[in-house]
Image: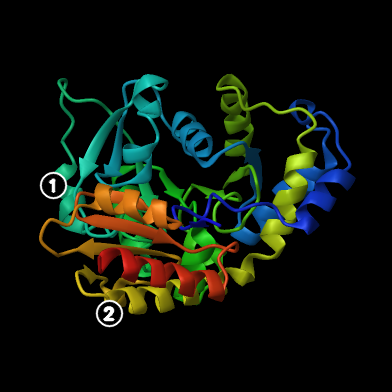
Amino acid sequence: MLIDLRSDTVTKPSQEMRQAMADAVVGDDVYQEDPTVKELEQLAAGILGKESALFVPSGTMGNLVAILTHCKSGDEVFLDEESHIYFYEVGGMAALGGLIPRLISNKRGIYHPKSLEDAWRPANIHFPNPGLLCLENTHNRGGGAVVPVERMKEAVEWARKKGLPVHLDGARIFNAALALGVDASVIAEEVDSVQFCLSKGLGAPVGSILAGSEEWINRARKWRKMVGGGLRQSGVLAAAGLVALKGRNRLAEDHQRAKDMARAINDIAGLTVEIDKVLTNIFMVDIDYPGGDADDLVEQLAEAGVLVNAVTKKRLRFVTHWDIDDISAQRAVGIVAEVVGK
């Protein structure tokens, strides 16, 4: 049986979720008549401390709808150069919104005030209008890195001085909240909009949530319809999201397994993990033996029964989730040791 550590998106819905989906009371959500979707949106908004929320099919759509709602075509969007929005969302902001990414270098999702200021251009007839600042917490390509609330506030304060709204890609915001020891509402408090995924660590089969003010969500709802996200009897999907959201505290198990696996893999000759940077359910493994190539190792591990992703030619990404128990985690480490030791 394959042990799939490529992402926390690969989980199978639990029996409780399947039953909730079968029993869901539904209506047409485009007419805002689906009671289960409404329940999910109200619960999510309350947890995040926002006035309103919107159920969307995916995190990519949630981020796209947020950006389109905040900006006008031709605007400039300030982004971390390693952000998920820029790196993994198919250039939607440019292709569908006519928006220009202004890339900023930072470390593991943490903006430095100077890097933000250096990216800012004064009013000039030759330059696009600034439209939005995007944050990410946890930071995917940073290895599940957690951005401290204080550092987020610094970036938000900079944006406020410049007259910019702020959107948070909080795909794994509950992982960040757990690692920081705060409620998710504390992380979301300062930003204008936030997106989080129900289908990542929370384990639902489909869906994400976009949250913000009631007025802003009303506008975002129209953008969702325009990009094809208007769903009908979507309570069958929202029902699984409710189960996932109510069970969010179990993420602590994923974090602990990631730390345990990272320590064990770090003991394997030729592989290195920066243990102090393993804060959530994602960790990066660097390959540092002669001839070691991430793509080759991914293939060898798959043949032996472990699925992981290559991030670069010398780096692998491992992600724990609720389909990975202690036994499968230990077995995966053993397979990694055996393959690397050949």
Disc 1 residue type? Asp
Q: In which quarter of the image is residue 157?
A: bottom left
Crowdedness near tag 1: few (<14), some (14–19) or many (≥20) residues, C-alpha within 10 Å: few
Q: Name the residue furthest front.
A: 342
* Residue that mark 1 sits on: 118
Question: How far across and down, in percent of the image, does residue 251 sit?
Answer: 57, 69
Per the image, label 2 sits on a secondary structure element best described as loop
Q: Residue at x 69, y 52 (%)?
A: 13
| Image position of 175 with respect to 52: above or below | below
User: For residue 166, which numbered disc appears in the image?
Assistant: none
| Image position of 128 with respect to 315: above or below | above
Q: Nearer the viewer, residue 23 or 55?
A: 23
* Residue that mark 2 sits on: 267
Query: Which of the two labelled residues, at mark 2 and mark 1, occupies the earlier sequence position?
Result: 1
Task: Point out the image quarter for the N terminus.
Answer: bottom right
Disc 2 residue type? Asp
The label nearer to you, 2 versus 1, is 2
Question: How far across and down, in percent of the image, does residue 324 sit?
Answer: 55, 65
